[in-house]
Amino acid sequence: MGLAAYNQITEKVMLGTDGMHCDMLRSAKAAFLSGQPVEGLGMDTTYNRLRNVHHYIKEAGFTGDTDNNLVVLDYDSPTELTNENFIGHFIYGINSSHVETVVAGGKVIVEDRVLKTADETEILAYARQMGDRLWDKMK
């Protein structure tokens, strides 16, 4: 995540993780907090940057961003959740641990917080092996 006045370049700014992790909610919070002093980034602009990926996918002609997508959150809000304060909850309250179910293209990807489309233990074991190989090469 670089720090620049991106809104002066384009309104089509999206958020990403820069390969550091896979948590877009965490990236949105970091972008908001670091973007305030640099470009006066507001919570609404941060949320829009997260959502801009849908516009990009559509404009680029990619498939996969269908109407049959859903994320179910288990978020026991400490204050009432309304349309007026949703973005505040999005920035300060909701995090990836609240994700209970994910449906993409009508297919259940995560259910009861468990990845259903791949063996996460196997993926993590492989990632550790590749990390060890990388570190060995860097010695």
Image (spheres, rainbow, N blue to C red):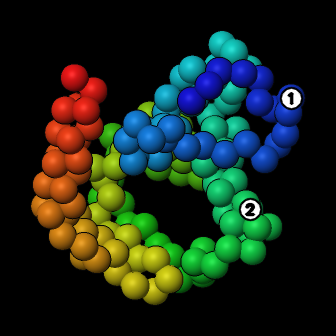
The residue at the point 74 percent across, 62 percent down is 55
Mark drawn on residue 17: none
Say which label, 1 or 2, has the lower sequence index: 1
The residue wearing badge 2 is: 55
| Percent of width and height locating residue 120 | 19, 63
The residue at the point 63 percent across, 78 percent down is 63
In the displayed structure, 68 sits above or below 129; it is below
In the displayed structure, 124 sits above or below 66; it is above
Amino acid type, callout 2: His
Between residue 89 and residue 128, name the one nearer to us.
128
- Identify the image quadrant of the N terminus: top right
- Identify the image quadrant of the C terminus: top left
The residue at the point 73 percent across, 60 percent down is 56
Between residue 32 and residue 13, name the one nearer to us.
13
The answer to whether residue 111 shows anywhere in this view is no
Number of numbered markers: 2
- In the picture provided, is 96 more to the left or to the right than 63? left
Mark drawn on residue 8: 1
